[in-house]
Image (tube, grey):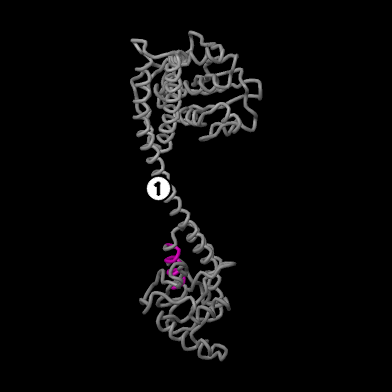
Amino acid sequence: MFFKQRGNKYNWREIFVRYGVKLASLSNPQEVYKTLLHTLTELSGASNASILIYDTLLKQYVLKENLGYNPMTVSISAQHPLILWIKRDAHPLLKSQLIEDSKLVDIKIPALTYFSEWYSEISFPLMTEKKFLGLFNLGPKKDKHYDSEDIELFSTLLSLGAIFIENAHYYETLYRQNIKLSELAKLKTQFVSNITHELRTPLHGILGLAELLLEDPDQCLNTDYIRYLNMMKNSGSELLEVVDHILELTKYQSGLVELNIKKIDLRRLILEAVALLQAHFDQQECQFLMDWPDSTPGIYGDEQELKQVINDLISNSLKFTKKGKVMISAQKSGEMLKICVQDTGIGISEEDQMKIFEDFRQADNDLNREYGGTGLGLSLAKKIIELHGGRIWVESKKSMGSSFYFTLPLRPLEASNEFSEAPSQSFH
């Protein structure tokens, strides 16, 4: 037996300890209902029991669980006289009281009908401090009546049980809402992914035609047309970059990113990125410097993903640095390589240094209007670096430039031996 009775009365301490521990382990309302039914029928020796809980949609008290005889009905109106009386009085009601107490004459007939339909001998209110949840019915005891200690013990147990019922309902509601939110997030991610894929196709076509016209082997275009084509190409390239960032973001939000891990010469990736941005360096009158000793070891990572990080960090520093310098340095730090992308640009205030790594966030709305950008570059960089097992952070002061640091592993994620060449590996 779950509880043991000692002597003629109850061991209250043992009952409450075991009862509380059992209920505290449950988060499903149906399991709480079953525990209440089994506990009270075992303690009381009642032949049957049932629980009714208010249904906000039906606006009725509905049968949630029963033990023993099946009741003749499965719900009762919220305006039933018995419900209204117990709700107002906040005390259990015995069937014998209906016959003996003249104050109950107004509800006697409907209440006796209720007790017959639910095979109940006593009905307890299920109440928390501020809310009436429903009723708990207990059937008759074998050759015994419910005495004052029975009623006091069961009322106290059900008061505790009502709290766990309410908590279980809150938990279930939150769980269902989280599932819905998760499903909506997946739908949003799929929608954005589909849209960005559809945008990339015509953008590639526009850029391809612009480049074809700019080649102009017969020199048919005048200076203005060439300038317009260059403007169209630059605008199309910027839009394609935005689309690619959004597509990359949805990939990481979906949680379905697969890294192709191999040994990488990060210096080569940096020089390739700088070569692609050289025209922008010249336009900004910005100098590029590199402090990369020959002894700097290679790192392990996904080359395509890290290209994105390198390009975004250099582009970001370049965008906010006019007539200054951008310098990249590296040094070994334990089992990681620490890389720094440093600039002499406008800098970032201390309060803005955390939010720049959030999706669609920049340090200042005024900067967004002046310098443009989606606010996704640093957010993506953070996701990519952390997926590689590293971290990224910034040190900066207003008007004194910024230093973006990030770390990458010097050995494969699962390696425990000395650093060595290894075949490509896939990690989820």
Q: Quadrant of the C terminus?
A: top left
Q: Residue at x 55, y 89 (%)?
A: 101
Most foreground residue, 22 or 299: 299
Give the percent coordinates (x, y) of residue 58.
43, 70
Q: Residue at x 62, y 22 (%)?
A: 346
Q: State which region is magenta.
A: 31-42
Count the numbered circles shown: 1
Q: Which residue is mark 1?
A: 183
> What secondary structure is the magenta-colored segment mainly?
helix
Q: Quadrant of the N terminus?
A: bottom left
Is residue 88 at least partly visible in the picture? yes
Type of the residue with mark 1: Glu
Give the percent coordinates (x, y) of residue 344.
61, 17
Q: Quadrant of residue 273?
A: top left
Task: Based on the picture, tell me whether residue 36 belongs to the magenta stretch.
Answer: yes
**326 over 396 or under it: above or below:** above
Q: Quadrant of residue 269?
A: top left
Q: Secondary structure at mark 1?
A: helix
Most foreground residue, 304 or 169: 304
Label 1 crowd (10 A; few <14 / some 14-19 / many >=20): few
Most foreground residue, 415 or 148: 415
Give the percent coordinates (x, y) of residue 131.
56, 68
Relative placement, left or right, of 372 versus 224 is right
Task: Based on the picture, tell me whether residue 402 belongs to the magenta stretch.
Answer: no
